[in-house]
Amino acid sequence: MKHILFIFFILTFISCAEVKQPIEKVINDQTGPFRDLIEFVSKDGLKISADIYKIDNTSPIIILCHQARYNKSEYMEIAPKLNAMGFNCIAINQRSGGDLNGFKNDTYERAKEKNLSTDYLDAEQDITAAIEFIKENKSSNQKIILWGSSYSSTLAMYFIANNSDIDAVVAFSPGNYFSEQKGSLIPLLKDVVKPVFVTSSKSEAPSIKELLVEMRLNNNQIHFIPASKGYHGSKALWKWQKGGKEYWGAITSFLEQFKK
């Protein structure tokens, strides 16, 4: 019975608004009670795979983007915990990625088969497609939180500066990596007033401070510096990571504002 209800909820999520982007298919995944695979199309027609971790039709939605050479399995431990905190999640496979945790990045594999570039900036259109897919299929009152890891967290910072559809950003280990191609993030972030949570390993904290130097940080804009050595990217939240609890405490506190 629970399985039948879950399928109903997933189909309700997909059909709750007119679908303007083509949905290729939804495949039930027997490995977990909350995870389903969905495929949709990126801006250039490349098929993007994503895992949906859904709890309801009203709670905020977090788009989870992985780091370099990784895939959506970066969030296999993280997304269920976010579900328990009251958030729907969708973890996407960007074309700039690779194998992780015994899983392949099928979006990357498709891009290579089509001779498409898989550089970091090429994945920006995949994140845009995920934002548009969620926007077109969510309830009107659901907020969208964009979560990035390493290079994708840098892209997330560009989105919070330039994309009105994003309500908040969580950025694990961003940097001014694309300043030559897209312009420096530093002045772009100056006028950002939406909630932002930025963190990294302890050794990366000085460069994060430089990145945020012109931001008028408010109570909803957090630069969290771990007391421990910490880690690069969202893997700081993985089970058994030393210092992981302090990261979880900080992100839990930040996300609390969206549950009101």
Image (cartoon, helix red, strand yellow):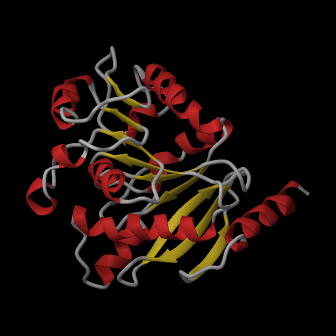
Against 95, residue 30 (above or below) is: above
Q: Residue furthest top?
A: 227
- Picture quadrant of residue 26: bottom right
Left or right of 48 in this view: 230: left
Residue at 41% x, 76% y is 42
Q: Position of residue 16 (x, y in %)?
A: 72, 70
When the figure is inspected, residue 82 is found, relative to residue 164, above or below; the finding is: above
Residue 58's x, y, as percent?
71, 52
| Quarter occupied by residue 142 | bottom right
230 versus 170 height, above or below: above
Residue 142, compared with residue 174, is above or below; it is below
Question: Which quadrant is home to the C terminus?
Answer: top right
Q: For the N terminus, give its image quadrant.
A: bottom right
Furthest residue in direction left, as rendered: 180
Q: Position of residue 238 (x, y in %)?
A: 46, 34
Percent position of residue 78, x then y = 53, 40
Rendered residue at 23%/64% (across/down): 121
Q: Is 13 in front, or is 222?
A: 222
Q: Residue at x 59, y 40 (%)?
A: 82
Q: What is the count of numbered marks?
A: 0
Q: Is residue 84 left or right of residue 220?
A: right
